[in-house]
Amino acid sequence: MEQLHDTPEARPDRYRWVIVVTASIVLAVAMGQLVNGLSAFFTPLEDSEGWSRGDIALINSAGLIGLALGGIAMGWLADRVETRKVVLAGAIVTGLCVTAAGFVTSLPQLYALFFVAGALGGGALFAPLFALVGSWFRTGAGLAIGIVSAGQAMGQGGIPLANAMLIDALGWRGAFVAIGLASLVIMLPLALLARAPKAGAVGTAAQAVEEAPAVRPAVVVVLMSLGVIFCCGLMSVPLMHLAPLVELCGATGPEAGGVLFVMMLTAIAGRVAFGKLADVIGALPAYLAASAWQTALVYVFIQIDDIGMFYLFAPIYGFGYAGVMTGVLTSIRALIPAWCRAGASGIIIAFAWGGHGLGGWLGGTFFDRTGSYDLTFGVAALAGVMNLALILTLWALVLRGRSHPTRPEKPALA
């Protein structure tokens, strides 16, 4: 009998799990700072500098706008330059900008630093790293993406808690310097591990012929881009304003950071679970389920005024909300053909970060105008309803397209 050789084409490359771990840790450190790490700084900056919460929230928004714009450019660059170089540059820029934030003398300087950190730092990490993970996994990609998203969730819970403790010990300036230097120490060695798979290393599935898309890619991009503005606008409200909300109930900074940390701990499990769910029931239904979960529960936070109840409810919300970003990424992979997936991803994710920045800023502005978070969380719930309507529209179009298949779209000739 002929022996089957254990060739790279016949087995998956084990290095793909090194890529998963690397991407998870790097995104945990970087996104933990750029997405919601600033939440621990609201009260200290308000007390020491006299800035309003809307103005402070705009620091985070500047970073997310930079992340949105930079993600498009850096995603394009990562297709043409060695990914390791792009990721290494992103790690350096992120760490240096956060460190420099400890030495600012004005609010506009913080806006500028976080914009650069987002555009040239996080933008060079998020899309390129998820694209890199996708290039190593041709089967079970939903689970792999879920694991990397879980790493990001760990950072989004751990970094604000670490920031709160550092602020207590070093003040807000010392906290920025400490977390920035720690970021450089952690991310730089890991960035050197990022490399693309060798030709054929991911098996013959890499050459599989794709099915015709059920919906035109342009339609998917438009509907998903509109949807993520609303779903990420909702998502940003608890991420940015839950800690200050808990502090209004008499909790200390570390206690409020602990609530966010517990929520993000369950989000780790939620991102993995919804990634696996996407492999089982489909990416778009899994995205719909996660979006419905966060929409139904987000306003409950306003009904709580006890620290113990916050600790009980936050993990329940966190498990389901966590599946949203996993759902976005797996839906892009499922609905957009490979020849235009990178460009489409950059556009959709740009709108996602834009919605995230808009929601966080509006949340702070509504609080400044009303003196409470009722309107902030109410508008967040309404945004979730709008997102659900858009996802259901896209799902209906997908089902219709599958029942009436068309010929595959071809890329335009250069």
Image (cartoon, helix red, strand yellow):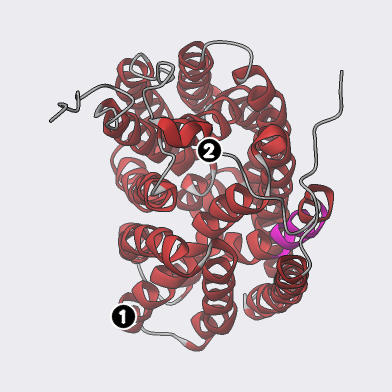
Residue with the mark numbered 1: 312
**Residue drawn at point x = 30 percent, y = 47 percent:** 165
**Residue drawn at point x = 53 percent, y = 38 percent:** 208
Q: Quadrant of residue 182?
A: top left
| 19 horizontally vs 239: left or right | left
- Residue 208 is tagged as 2
Q: Quadrant of residue 111?
A: top right
| 224 horizontally vs 374: left or right | right
| Nearer-the-camera pick, 164 or 330 | 330
Number of dots carrying numbers:
2
Q: CA distance from mark 1 to mark 2?
A: 46 Å
Is the C-beta separation of discs 1 and 2 under 8 Å?
no
Percent across and percent down for residue 196 are: 44, 19
Span of residues in magenta: 222-230
Percent across and percent down for residue 128 are: 54, 28
Whether 85 is drawn above or below 315: the answer is: above
